[in-house]
Image: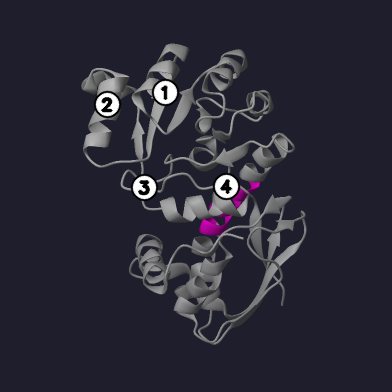
Amino acid sequence: MAEFPLNQTEIDQFIDLAFAEDIGSGDVTAQSVIPDSAQLSATMNAREDLVLAGLPLVAPIFRRLDNNVEITMHAADGEKVAAGGQISTIVGSARALLTAERTALNILQHLSGIATLTQQYIKAIEGTGTRLLDTRKTIPGLRKLAKYAAASGGAQNHRMGLFDAVMIKDNHLAVAGSVEQAVSAAKASGQSQIQVECDTLEQVREALDAGATSLLLDNMAPATLQQAVAIVDGRMPLEASGGVTLKSIRAIAETGIDFVSVGRLTQSAPAVDIGLDYAS
């Protein structure tokens, strides 16, 4: 299971931002309708089959408004929960719980949606030996959490940002002039691991000759991917990317490619349905 990526300071900052935009100067509904002494017992339930991600944020969100809240977790991140299954039981101040409810649900639904979709892709390539990667296509400010959710669903994290790996893409090549010039410049700057995005088999050969250490094969049909795999012949890792869907990923994986990266995992995964239901 992936390690939760936020430290306590980052968790506090996340909650600060979330509450600032949602609560603002105060929850006028809870303050005017709910007695200050009222207690609430509720269960957080899955309303559809899902894979969990984001539970380590739930308790801190509720505890920010009620230090004495009692929270019992019935599942953990990375676990599958069937529709109707209990995720957690929460008992505490009714005002606090109802005020924090949407923030807790929003992030849990979003991250669990990523994990759930990721596992669907994992199942689609099961047995091929190809590994699933996420991408940098994330909502700004949520990258660590989105990639954690993808890992909770079974994907392998790709680079976290522009700072931790060289990936020479089409626009870089356009400015640099050629694959050879771009790779040479990267080497001259001291970079040893250099991935090149290739749109054609000619670029695959150029990148091999230039000394790239891995290739990203962009929007290639399975037949073309097979040719690329034959050309490279195991000399470096190959990643397929571009427009990959649940319908197409199996055929891509069966070409013998090492990795398939899917932007949809973090860019457009639908939120799953999780509810906080009154118990007593």
SS of the residue under disc 2: helix
Q: Which residue is mark 1?
A: 208
> Sequence order check: which comes first, mark 4 or mark 3?
4
Q: Which residue is mark 3?
A: 140
Distance, label 1 to label 3, CA atoms, is: 34 Å
Q: Amino acid at mark 1?
A: Leu
Q: Is residue 59 magenta?
A: no
> Sequence order check: which comes first, mark 2 or mark 3?
3
Labelled pair 2, 3 in contact (Cβ < 8 Å): no
Q: Is residue 163 above or below residue 251?
A: below
Q: Which mark is residue 114?
A: 4
Q: Amino acid at mark 4?
A: Ile
Residue 269 visible (yes or no): no
Residue at 51 percent of width and 34 percent of height: 237
Q: Which residue is mark 2?
A: 182
SS of the residue under disc 4: helix
In the figure, is residue 224 to the left or right of 49?
left
SS of the residue under disc 3: loop
Q: Nearer the viewer, mark 1 or mark 3?
A: 1
Labelled pair 4, 3 in contact (Cβ < 8 Å): no
